[in-house]
Image (cartoon, grey):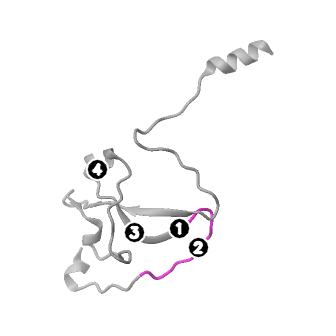
Amino acid sequence: MRALLSALLLQGAQGFYLPGVNPYSFSEGESVKLKVNKMTSQKTLLPVDYYRLPFCQPVGGPKMDHENLGEFLAGDRIESSPYRLKMKVDMFCEQLCITNLGRGEQKG
């Protein structure tokens, strides 16, 4: 018994740490913020602001939502989104907005 306990204590633990990010456990039914970031084109490899494309925006416009200094220094443009999610709750598709894609936007 003593040898087994010693072996378990000496084995060590596996894990990782992401600087500036704290783990958070959501409760069932709790709201989960869905955030958006920049998008990168496969053709040009240039980043494009998410809301420069014709996506639905939150009421009152998107708000910057940096969680830590690393996101800010990396140039990530993390913004709020209009999507609503709840932890471990089945949800169905909902219409957020209607957008009209013109000819130039359809070419992509």
Amino acid, disc 3: Ser
- Image coords of residue 6 (percent x, y): 70, 15
Amino acid, disc 1: Leu
Q: Residues within 10 Å of mark 1 (few under 14, many from 20)?
A: some
Answer with mark 4 or mark 2, whichever residue precedes in sequence.
4
Q: Is residue 44 above or below residue 68?
A: below
Answer with mark 4 or mark 3, whichever residue precedes in sequence.
4
Q: Is residue 58 above or below residue 101?
A: above
Q: What residue would you read off at disc 1?
A: 85
- Image coords of residue 85 (percent x, y): 53, 67
Q: Secondary structure at mark 1?
A: strand
Q: Is residue 82 above or below residue 74?
A: below
- Image coords of residue 18 (percent x, y): 43, 39
* Residue numbers of the magenta segment: 85-96
At 59% across and 23% down in the image, what residue appears? Answer: 12
Q: Secondary structure at mark 3?
A: strand
Q: What residue would you read off at disc 4?
A: 72
Left or right: where does residue 34 sit relative to residue 41?
Answer: right
At 55% across and 30% down in the image, what residue appears? Answer: 14
Q: Are marks 1 and 2 in contact (CB under 8 Å)?
A: yes
Q: Viewer-nearest of labels 2 and 3?
A: 3
Label number found at residue 91: 2
Q: Residues within 10 Å of mark 3 (few under 14, many from 20)?
A: many
Report how far apart the C-alphas of labels 3 and 1 lie in the structure: 11 Å
Report how far apart the C-alphas of labels 4 and 2 lie in the structure: 32 Å
Q: What residue would you read off at disc 3?
A: 81
At 45% across and 63% down in the image, what residue appears? Answer: 34
Answer with mark 1 or mark 2, whichever residue precedes in sequence.
1
Q: Which image quarter holds the C terminus?
A: bottom left
Q: Are marks 1 and 4 in contact (CB under 8 Å)?
A: no
Answer with mark 1 or mark 4, whichever residue precedes in sequence.
4
